[in-house]
Amino acid sequence: MGKSIGEQATLLAMRALGKLMEDPKYAAHMAGILVAAQRGRETLGTVQSAALRAGGLATRDDFKAVGRRLSQLKRTGLALLEKLEALEMNQH
């Protein structure tokens, strides 16, 4: 069976990009674009966090921190439960 049009288009695009990336100037230019995009993404995240905090809302980092704290509390609770069970076994 032949390849679908989507698969053919993907292969063609990959080949074209490969040829373009052979040019050092083009590759350096693309690297610069990617770095700028990453910086923009980081800036957007910083501004978004500041806006959410200013509005009294939780940020993604806040949710992550709460998740980590809950995991820590769960581990501590399980350890205390094991100790309590061990103490109960020693009393009987």
Image (cartoon, rainbow, N blue to C red):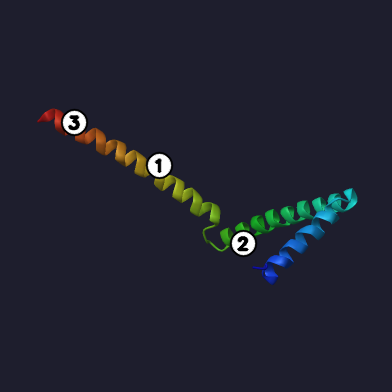
- For label 1, count other residues whose C-alpha is less than 10 Å away and answer few (under 14), some (14-19) or many (20+): few
From the image, tell me which residue sits under label 2: 51
Residue displayed at 58% across by 61% down: 52
x and y percent of residue 80 in the render? 28, 36
Residue displayed at 67% across by 70% down: 4
Eye-nearest disc, 2 or 1:
1
Answer whether labels 3 and 1 touch (C-beta < 8 Å): no
- For label 3, count other residues whose C-alpha is less than 10 Å away and answer few (under 14), some (14-19) or many (20+): few
Amino acid identity at mark 1: Gln
Amino acid identity at mark 2: Ala
**Between discs 2 and 1, the one toward the N terminus:** 2
Frontmost residue, 41 versus 19: 19
Q: Is residue 88 above or below residue 58?
A: above
Residue 91, located in which quarter of the rendered image?
Answer: top left
x and y percent of residue 58 in the render? 52, 58
Frontmost residue, 64 versus 7: 7
Secondary structure beneath dot 2 equals helix
Q: CA distance from mark 2 to mark 1?
A: 29 Å
Which label was assigned to residue 72?
1
Extreme residue toward the left, this view: 92
Answer whether labels 2 and 1 touch (C-beta < 8 Å): no
On screen, residue 62 versus residue 40, left or right, reads left
Q: CA distance from mark 3 to mark 1?
A: 23 Å
Residue displayed at 63% across by 60% down: 48
Which label was assigned to residue 30?
none
Q: Is residue 2 above or below residue 40?
A: below
Q: CA distance from mark 2 to mark 3?
A: 50 Å
From the image, tell me which residue sits under label 3: 87
Residue 51, located in which quarter of the rendered image?
Answer: bottom right
Residue displayed at 87% across by 53% down: 26
Extreme residue toward the top, this view: 90
